[in-house]
Image (cartoon, helix red, strand yellow):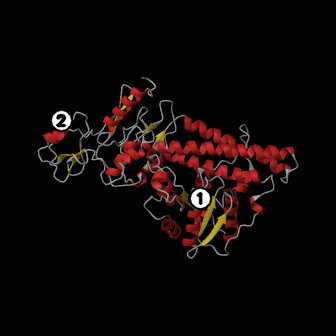
């Protein structure tokens, strides 16, 4: 658990490109965090649910499920900071932001070609999958099993 | 066309800040720069201790390597006929003895107090360097929690390692004193450019040094040293020629080296330091404050902490004029 993704996310949230540019006292919002669950690193990160409870619960319409991007996007400019999304999120992926007292969550950094957390991960544990990433992986695995390529099948 | 983002993946942010700690077997631990005072993982150590400890550990390791190279050079000199006279060779051997606790005249000849007052203010050891290194290691591993004391030890050790490098070249015939070190007749701040041989190929340091040289050539006199081992001799020559120690000349050393002892050694000898690459100390405001503001206030020279967004040449020229 090297935590490089967490630092990369925090640095990006502060609008910096290098950690050495940090100024003492700056506090980033928590959009990604890691904890050990029975010895295994577990990310508290937005899963961009298809039926997102946060989007359904949001009273100001600032949490929106974007089908095209296959992501749940948070618009901080309209967020009133009621905290309902934080209560209903089953993945503990939403937190209160220090600035403007609104909420903060992972928006997949749409302005970047790939999110800094994914770039920072050296082991490939964090990847940015496409919409049907899991379904494709399952299909591939099933095909391998059928053709006898799978080592454990 | 090379994609720099693909070719050079982002470096470890904690490593850049000096906040990785492998001091105990529970580690390695990483301390977030956003953690408060109680953010330690198992031991509860704060970021100041972690950064200072990392600096010290690195300096210890590199100093030991320099001492080992010095010992090997002395052994080779003992086997065959050396240019160095026997009494001087004996003094050199005493510097490496872990048991010799007496005074040795050699350190004062390499670093005379009048030429290196800032180094002597840091209590540079007058006896065996190896004994001093062992003493510092013993104190460091016990209960030293004083960040400033740790950094002062790192500066002392770096100066010792530089002198060891200089002396280890002496028996082979490449005495730094004999090399030609040109200096202007009158005292003025100058820019010292040093790059060691241990750099990685294509790491960009030569290009950067050329860029600095081109940008500063009009503004300031530039001295290029082929090896860091010549630095003690240069410091002595500054005093002989100008009658002032290097720390009062207001000069800046740009040290492109993968060894921390080279840059910290230049800082200990009285030069302001611009290190390439920059040192991983930004994770601790206290460590950074000691190497920048505290040294500047106390001795007049300091480590130039250049942020990635800032222009290195501008900082160097600013450091020269200050």
Label 2 element class? helix
Q: Position of residue A36 (x, y in %)?
A: 36, 30
Q: As rendered, which of B294 and B64 lies closer to the eye?
A: B64
Q: Is residue B203 left or right of residue A21?
A: right
Q: Is residue B157 above or below residue B3?
A: above
* Residue A83 shows in the view: no
Give neighbour class at mark 2: few <14, some 14-19, many 20+ (Cα, 10 Å). Answer: some
**Residue for badge 2:** A88
Q: Which residue is mark 1?
A: B255
Q: Are marks 1 and 2 in contact (CB under 8 Å)?
A: no
Disc 2: host chain: A
Count of numbered marks: 2
**Residue sitting at 33 percent across and 36 percent down?**
A136
Q: Residue furthest top?
A: A153
Q: Position of residue B87 (x, y in %)?
A: 83, 49
Q: Is B99 above or below relative to A19?
A: above
When asked about the image quadrant of residue B218, the answer is: bottom right
Give the chain letter at badge 1.
B
| Residue lying furthest right | B81
């Amino acid at each position: 658990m090297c935590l490089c993704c967490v630092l990369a996310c925090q640095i990006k949230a502060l609008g910096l490109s290098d950690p050495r540019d940090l100024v003492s006292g700056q506090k980033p919002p928590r959009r990604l965090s890691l904890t050990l669950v029975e010895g295994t690193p577990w990310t508290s990160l937005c899963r961009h649910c298809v039926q997102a409870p946060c989007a359904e619960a949001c009273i100001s319409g600032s949490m929106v499920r974007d089908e095209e991007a296959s992501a749940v996007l948070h618009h901080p400019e309209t967020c009133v900071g009621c905290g309902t999304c934080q209560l209903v999120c089953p993945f503990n992926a939403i937190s209160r932001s220090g600035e403007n007292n609104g909420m903060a969550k992972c928006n997949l950094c749409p302005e970047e070609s790939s999110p800094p957390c994914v770039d920072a991960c050296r082991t490939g544990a964090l990847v940015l999958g496409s919409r049907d990433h899991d379904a494709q992986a399952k299909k591939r695995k099933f095909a391998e099993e059928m053709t006898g390529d799978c080592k454990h099948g | 066309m090379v994609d720099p983002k693909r070719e050079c993946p982002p470096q470890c942010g904690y490593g850049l800040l000096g906040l990785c700690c492998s001091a105990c077997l529970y580690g390695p631990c990483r301390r977030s720069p956003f953690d408060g005072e109680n953010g330690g993982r198992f031991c509860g150590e704060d970021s100041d201790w972690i950064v200072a400890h990392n600096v010290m550990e690195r300096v210890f390791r590199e100093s030991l390597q320099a001492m080992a190279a010095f010992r090997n050079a002395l052994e080779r000199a003992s086997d065959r006929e050396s240019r160095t006279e026997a009494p001087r060779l004996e003094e050199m051997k005493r510097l490496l003895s872990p048991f010799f606790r007496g005074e040795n005249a050699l350190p004062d000849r390499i670093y005379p107090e009048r030429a290196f007052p800032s180094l002597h203010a840091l209590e540079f050891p007058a006896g065996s360097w190896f004994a001093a290194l062992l003493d510092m290691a013993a104190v460091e591993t016990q209960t030293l929690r004083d960040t400033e004391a740790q950094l002062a030890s790192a500066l002392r050790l770096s100066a010792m390692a530089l002198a060891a490098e200089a002396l280890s070249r002496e028996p082979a015939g490449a005495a730094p004193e004999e090399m030609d070190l040109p200096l202007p007749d009158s005292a003025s701040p100058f820019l010292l450019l040093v790059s060691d041989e241990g750099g990685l190929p294509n790491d960009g340091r030569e290009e950067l040094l050329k860029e600095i040289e081109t940008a500063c050539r009009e503004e300031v006199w530039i001295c290029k040293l082929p090896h860091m081992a010549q630095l003690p001799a240069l410091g002595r020559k500054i005093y002989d020629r100008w009658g002032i120690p290097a720390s009062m000349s207001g000069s800046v050393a740009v040290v492109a080296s993968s060894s921390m002892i080279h840059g910290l050694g230049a800082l200990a000898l009285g030069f302001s330091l611009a290190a390439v690459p920059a040192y991983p100390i930004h994770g601790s405001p206290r460590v950074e404050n000691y190497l920048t503001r505290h040294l500047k206030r106390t001795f007049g020279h300091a480590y130039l902490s250049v942020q990635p967004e800032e222009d290195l040449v501008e900082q160097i020229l600013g450091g020269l004029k200050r």
